[in-house]
Amino acid sequence: MRSNKFPALVVFLSLAIVPHGLSATNQSTTSLKLLGTSKIGSRASSAGTENGFEFRVGPDVDKNFNKQISGSIAPARVPADHVPKPAGNAVTTANSGFFGFDGITHFDQRFAGTGIYTNTQFSLEPPDQGLAVGNGFVLEVVNNALAVYDTSGNRLSGPTAMSQFFGLAPEIVRPSGPFGPFVSDPKAYFDSDTQRWFLTEAVLDVDPTTGNFTGTTGVLIAVSQTPDPTKPFNLFRLDTTDNTGTPDHPGCPCLGDQPLIGADANGFYISTNEFPLFQAGFNGAQIYAMSKTTLAAGSPPPVIHFRSLNFAPGLPFFSVQPATTPPGGSFETANGGTEYFLSSLDFSSTLTNQIAVWAMTNTSSLNDANPNPTLTTVVIDSEVYGQPPDGQQRPGPTPLATVFIPQIFGGKTPPTEKLELIAGNDDRMNQVVFADGKLWSGVNSVVKTPNGPTRIGIAF
């Protein structure tokens, strides 16, 4: 039986628990393709004018991965006597005078691009963001555009279309094509150890005539050549199609959905959720490990692929989140270098009180011609967490229905809008930080207020 008292999701790594190793048959070596170099460019010289408000439809693969409470996400379906009931805590900050600054807007994203990329962007939602800070710079990427700011919010370069930055064909040459690859799910990271900036973006190739997916997919990787993100980057591509016999994965060609990134002293790590593109299915989490210093030097390193990670037969792990170490922190040097990962274990989208802790050891071998890291995992008790409901949003400074594009509604008054709920998504693991010998992370979770309804909260 499990104890009624659970440690928080701050994981002390001196646990005397025997981890489970993964079979060598689940490990293979692949490679990166060097694409060339690029630089985050200047902003378009003139403001764009909307003449095409198309939304590009991405692969709806998550519908094949049921992480919702059966039938509804209504709080009434959650067993109330087990839902966490945290005490209310006032929000505090170490810098109460700082209110942030405006980053990339939808307008910036839609009209990013110069030259042949002018007016070639689709409107995308929701605004998936990657953000990294270091050396006095802030690098932001939202969906299909990126920009660099100083820490006061002054824009130094961009916004640049991601298609332009990675040398892809434009998303759409209006009004009816040709079409370029679909890009999504950006991530950004500044590595204080190598003084390099890392960017990733999922990519799906399309038929230029129809815009339909061809089946080939990958993760695009950009690594800066210097500590300054306004300077050139080296570009790489990691294939995630997994139908080329190395070996073939079930149902592939596949998509490496929602890439997650992390790093230790030796490696750069990408984790994806693998879905077949043209049929239902889920092949579990995939982890790719490669030399960080080789990437920083501008060369494509060998890549170790740990594939189709399963908790039990028919029960695949999902969203295995790699850790990063903050500037000034110490990397884990034991066992030839160790990178840690965390993943949640709420397979039934209800409530659970366990998480998985992963350790990739011998990461120093990633710098060798024939890397040989080992991946193990252990399941530990945690505080209770579970599938969150959607959240209420506060009204912003601009009331709904006061700003609209006349041509969308034929010059007529737009329909009355209401303040929508914010999707609570699910309780997959969020960012993981290795600091002070511990792993720090959190998940979205359902919580019960003392005298009110269930709401979305954070278990950490």
Image (cartoon, rainbow, N blue to C red):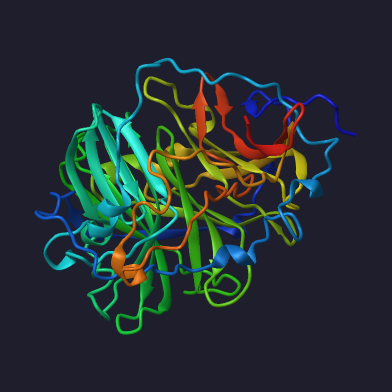
In percent of the image, x 76 and y 47: which residue is there? 350
Location of residue 259 with respect to 337 vertically, above or below: below
Question: Could you say where residue 359 lies in the image, as x and y percent from the top left?
Answer: 58, 38
Q: Can residue 334 be seen in this view?
A: yes
In percent of the image, x 41 and y 54: which residue is there? 401
Q: Quadrant of residue 184?
A: bottom left
Looking at the image, the residue that sits furthest to the bottom is: 209
In percent of the image, x 35 and y 49: which residue is there? 142
> For this view, does 181 lie left or right of residue 28?
left
Looking at the image, the residue that sits furthest to the front is: 413
Judging depth in this view, the residue of 158 and 53 nearest the camera is 53
Question: Could you say where residue 96 lies in the image, as x and y percent from the top left?
Answer: 40, 16
Question: Could you say where residue 319 lies in the image, as x and y percent from the top left?
Answer: 57, 49
Q: Quadrant of residue 211?
A: bottom left
Location of residue 199 with respect to 117 vertically, above or below: above
Question: Could you say where residue 301 lies in the image, as x and y percent from the top left?
Answer: 34, 51
The mark total stands at: 0
Q: Is residue 18 visible?
A: no
Judging depth in this view, the residue of 423 and 367 nearest the camera is 423
Location of residue 87 with respect to 246 vertically, above or below: above
Q: Quadrant of the N terminus?
A: top right
> For this view, does 118 lie left or right of residue 327?
left
Q: In which quarter of the image is residue 381?
A: top right
> For this view, does 196 lie left or right of residue 264?
left
In percent of the image, x 85 and y 27: which residue is there? 4
Judging depth in this view, the residue of 446 and 5 nearest the camera is 446
> For this view, does 144 lie left or right of residue 420?
left
